[in-house]
Image (cartoon, helix red, strand yellow):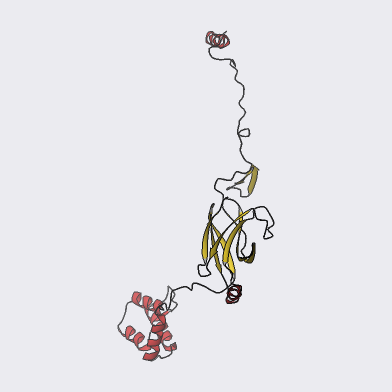
Amino acid sequence: MRKEEIHDFLKSEPSIQELRRFAKMLGVRLRRSMKKRDITKAIIKTSESRRPSSENTTANSTEKMRPSKPVNADLPSRYFRDYVVVHPVNPYWIHTMWDLSIRTAESLSRIDAKLFVRVSDITNIIYDGKNAHRFKEAQIDLEQGSWYFQVDFPDADYIGELGYYSGEVFVSILKSRITRTPRNSPKFTEFETWINRVKGGRQEIAASSEEAGMAFVPKSSGPSSSPSSEEFIKTISKSKSGR
């Protein structure tokens, strides 16, 4: 705000509430005990400390405060980096994504090889490129960039690869990190973690089972036989007669 506009506001004889609102807008710090003339002095002091600005400067500052318009919101289809990533979608589906650098793409074009993407099940093994339990693959174009695979087992480790065939041998040029598909059923454990919300802290105890959940029931003083038995009838008769 220009210095002239501040002086015009003060000449209009505003109320103390209007002065406080105006000072707050200018960023002037006020105390609750300040009176009308004190607030006016603080505003004048702030206006005198401001540098005079021209119309062009004001226009430029206003222009900078406007939100910028997006130049181009389209994301590039490729980033020309060598990578393969695999993401589990659910227990039975995996999404594979890839990209190649210009150098790697030129090397593949020189050998005129068809490109394949492969997902291998490597659960509980140290993968050496040949000992996967099973794999699924698809011939792809470099511009596709992604592929979905339906896998056989949940709660299993999978790795993605990009490569080509040299005769009958699959030559891997890029490998992903290992990913694990989620389980398709609840996971039961031998121990449960209980939290004490009053005292704090955690305690790990054995999970409840049929044997652990059976409470001790004290033996009754009455007969252990069936209610229709002779022993039960005699016991009831004694309790009624008091003998």
Residue at x 55% of width, y 67% of height: 98
The structure residue drawn at horizontal position 35% and vertical position 74%, both measured from the top left corner, is 17
Q: Is residue 58 left or right of residue 81?
A: left
When asked about the image quadrant of residue 179, the answer is bottom right
Quarter of the rendering occupied by the C terminus: top right
Q: Is residue 64 left or right of residue 123?
A: left
Rendering coords of residue 232 (x, y %): 56, 12
In front of the other: 218 or 156: 156
126 in relation to 204, above or below: below
In the rendered picture of this protein, how many numbered marks are placed on residues?
A: 0
Q: Position of residue 191 (x, y in %)?
A: 64, 43
Tell me what residue is drawn at x 56 percent, y 8 percent: 230
**Residue situated furthest left in the rendering:** 12
Quarter of the image for the N terminus: give it.
bottom left
**What is the residue that sits farthest to the front in this orientation?**
167
Whether 196 is drawn above or below 41: the answer is above
**Percent of width and height locating residue 71:** 42, 79
Is 196 in front, or is 71? 71
Q: Looking at the picture, how far across and down is residue 223, in whole percent?
A: 59, 15
Viewer-closest of 203 and 113: 113
